[in-house]
Amino acid sequence: VKTKLSSRKAEVVIGDELPTVLIGERLNPTGKKKLSAALLSGNYELVRNMALDQVRAGADILDVNAGVAGADEVALLKEMVRVVVETVDVPLCIDSKDPKALEASLEIYPGKALINSVTGEEASLRELLPLIKEHSAVVIGLTVDDEGIPKGPEQRLRIASKIVEKAESLGIPREDVVIDCLVMTLGADSNAGIVALEAVRKIRSELGVNMTCGASNISFGVPDRVLLNNTFLSMVIEAGINCPIVDVSTVRPTVLATDFILGHDRYAKRYSKGYRQRMGR
Ligand code: THG
């Protein structure tokens, strides 16, 4: 299954045999004082710089989230999207829980966007899928439903199937649904890693859809996050995640190495180029 996203100038393809597509996570004010303050005061300089930094570090897509307490998220997300579109050429992953904020941003987005996200909750499916269809967007389907976050891989598969079926019934092709089986932190549950890996394997083999996850979630509240994030990422890519949401600057070498090992980098072209860039030649 091949998933295509676009900006005004670029296209990104996510698929089985292709190199891992990296979605940069940093344009997200959750827990970030500086970015939150800048957004609240209408100063977009930091947003521009963070967008440029991530693309220079190798991000293929940028996640854009405007979840700041006390802000009008509809207006703020739209403005962030506008600024990022002006600043970089990569496609965007528009990240909000508010369907109205997603709608306002889709209306100004010049291309095929990734919408983050719909869940298996009835209200979410009902409000968001028609919007995805109308804009020919791609949607991330989170494996949560009205009963909350499922414990096991089996229930995550069931919710993923429901999202894919609902989308298809509205004329959204299955390649335009990317499943996220929701990575939890190891800080709260030492089985979080294995649960995620099993769910990814199951969903990939049963549904054949492309898959993302918030890879840095694995290490919230745990020491040496970069080490855990890198190790986990290598494992989930092998299990079937092909477009993770990550801190690109700290994980890209591991991702290039993992792709090379898995046969997704012929002649080690990307791996070698990444190495030369790090060595400054
Ligand atoms: N699935 C989907 N979307 C998501 C998530 C997911 N969006 C949000 C989140 N989870 C993924 N994005 C982040 C962004 C930042 C961090 C983790 C996940 C993070 N930030 C550091 C912190 O808060 O300590 C700050 C790092 C910095 O300074 O840049 O850990 O699961 N579909």
Image (tube, rainbow, N blue to C red):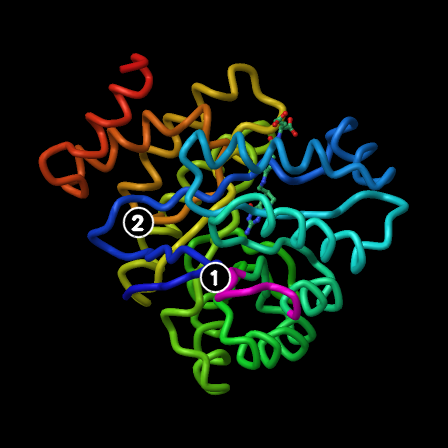
Q: Give yes or no for contact between labels 1 and 2 (Cβ–Cβ under 8 Å).
A: no
Is residue 137 positioned above or below 184 on the image? Answer: below
Give x and y (percent) for residue 142.
54, 59
Is 160 in front, or is 128? 128
Q: What's the distance in space between the residues labelled 1 and 2, CA to CA?
A: 18 Å
* Residue indicated by mark 1: 155
Task: Tell us which disc is closer to us: 1 or 2.
Answer: 2
- The crowding category of the residue bearing disc 2, from other C-alpha atoms within 10 Å (few below 14, some 14 to 19, many at least 20), is many
Asked if one can make out residue 195 in the rendered structure from this viewpoint, the answer is no
Is 160 in front, or is 45? 45
Give x and y (percent) for residue 48.
64, 37
Badge 2 marks a residue whose secondary structure is loop
User: Which segment did they paint magenta?
Assistant: 107-114
96 horizontally vs 223: left or right: right
Q: Say if the magenta span includes residue 113.
A: yes
Asked if one can make out residue 28 in the rendered structure from this viewpoint, the answer is yes
Amino acid type of the residue tagged 2 in the rendering: Gly
150 horizontally vs 18: left or right: right
Tell me what residue is drawn at x 29 percent, y 64 percent: 2
Residue 240: give its label.
2
- The crowding category of the residue bearing disc 1, from other C-alpha atoms within 10 Å (few below 14, some 14 to 19, many at least 20), is some
Residue located farthest toward the right when viewing the structure as drawn: 70
Instruction: State the predominant SS element of the stretch in magenta.
Output: loop
Give x and y (percent) for residue 250.
45, 24
